[in-house]
Image (spheres, grey):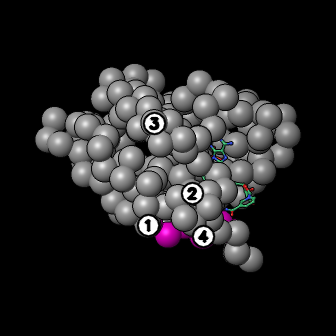
């Protein structure tokens, strides 16, 4: 099974970001992320043998994260994978701590996640942006803040309509 850990926005935030994604597609082209699949990945595990699912959940259960406010206030474009995304100009310190702690707990039980690149918190809004257009004239966005009180383990499957995600487990963050 293909797994990743993520922060999942509440409906109102997903709605605002989906509106932003539609506006970006009108301007730059590409394929908007569906509202119900908008998320921020904390750690991508990739293909994991199903027998390792209990250990994966247990590792996340010992993570000592604190809830925090996440403010999404910028757009970005990555040419290498032609993604337009929304992110944070000043990510909360608790987010970095959560990611480091989660990865540490996973490593401790020999579950590997992709750590090749520096963690850049982002929510992918548009995929397959026609080359060379995405980087031009990206404006700042009206800040959207959401209180992150939990994170989820998600199973990802490729379906005809795109990726389908299902939450496998949810983990609470302590009051900040
Ligand atoms: P996904 O590949 O399962 O990715 C789920 C989440 O993990 C996304 O937030 C993604 O970040 C992140 N992620 C994926 N690979 C990563 C890596 N190597 N390092 C760090 N983070 C990683 O599902 P998806 O994002 O919906 O699909 C992305 C593309 O992969 C699509 O073009 C899809 O067609 C293709 N794909 C999907 C599957 C599947 O089962 N879902 C299987 C094969 C190929 P980003 O949002 O930054 O991409």
Marks 4/3: CA–CA distance:
29 Å
Using the image, tell me which numbered label, if any, was put on residue 108: 3
Marks 1/3: CA–CA distance:
21 Å
Question: Would you say the residues marked 1 and 2 are in contact, meaning their CB atoms lie under 8 Å apart?
Answer: yes
Query: Tag 3's secondary structure?
Result: helix
Q: Quadrant of residue 155?
A: bottom right
Examine the rendered structure and indicate whether residue 166 appears above or below residue 113: below
Mark 1, residue position: 168
Question: Would you say the residues marked 4 and 2 are in contact, meaning their CB atoms lie under 8 Å apart?
Answer: no
Total numbered labels: 4
**Viewer-side label of 4, 2:** 2
Query: What are the residue bounds of the magenta stretch?
Result: 162-167
Of pointers 1 and 3, the one earlier in the residue sequence: 3
Query: Tag 2's secondary structure?
Result: strand
Label 4 near ligand 1 (CB < 8 Å): yes
Q: Where is residue 2 in the image (x, y as percent from the top left)?
A: 62, 60
Mark 4, residue position: 164
Direction from residue 68 to residue 139 in the image, left or right: right
Marks 4/1: CA–CA distance:
13 Å
Q: Position of residue 131 (x, y in %)?
A: 85, 40
Question: Would you say the residues marked 4 and 3 are in contact, meaning their CB atoms lie under 8 Å apart?
Answer: no
Query: Tag 1's secondary structure?
Result: strand
Question: Can residue 114 be seen in this snapshot?
Answer: yes
Extreme-left residue of the structure:
175
Q: How crowded is mark 1: few (under 14 residues within 10 Å), some or many (20 or more)?
A: some
Looking at the rendered image, the quarter that the C terminus falls into is top left
What residue is shown at x 36% (from left), y 53% (from top)?
A: 58
Query: Tag 4's secondary structure?
Result: strand
């Amino acid at each position: 099974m293909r797994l990743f850990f993520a922060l999942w926005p509440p409906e109102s935030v997903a709605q605002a970001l989906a509106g932003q994604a539609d506006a970006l597609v009108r301007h730059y082209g590409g394929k908007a992320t569906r509202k119900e699949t908008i998320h921020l990945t904390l750690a991508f595990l990739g293909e994991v043998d199903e027998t390792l699912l209990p250990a994966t959940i247990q590792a996340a259960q010992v993570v000592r994260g604190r809830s925090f406010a996440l403010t999404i206030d910028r757009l970005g474009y990555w040419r290498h994978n032609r993604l337009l995304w929304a992110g944070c100009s000043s990510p909360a310190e608790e987010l970095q701590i959560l990611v480091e702690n989660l990865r540490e707990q996973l490593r401790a039980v020999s579950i590997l996640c992709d750590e090749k690149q520096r963690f850049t918190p982002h929510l992918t809004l548009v995929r397959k942006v026609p080359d060379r257009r995405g980087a031009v004239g990206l404006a700042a966005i009206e800040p959207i803040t959401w209180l992150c009180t939990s994170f989820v383990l998600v199973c990802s499957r490729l379906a005809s309509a795109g990726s389908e995600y299902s939450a496998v487990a949810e983990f609470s963050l302590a009051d900040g």
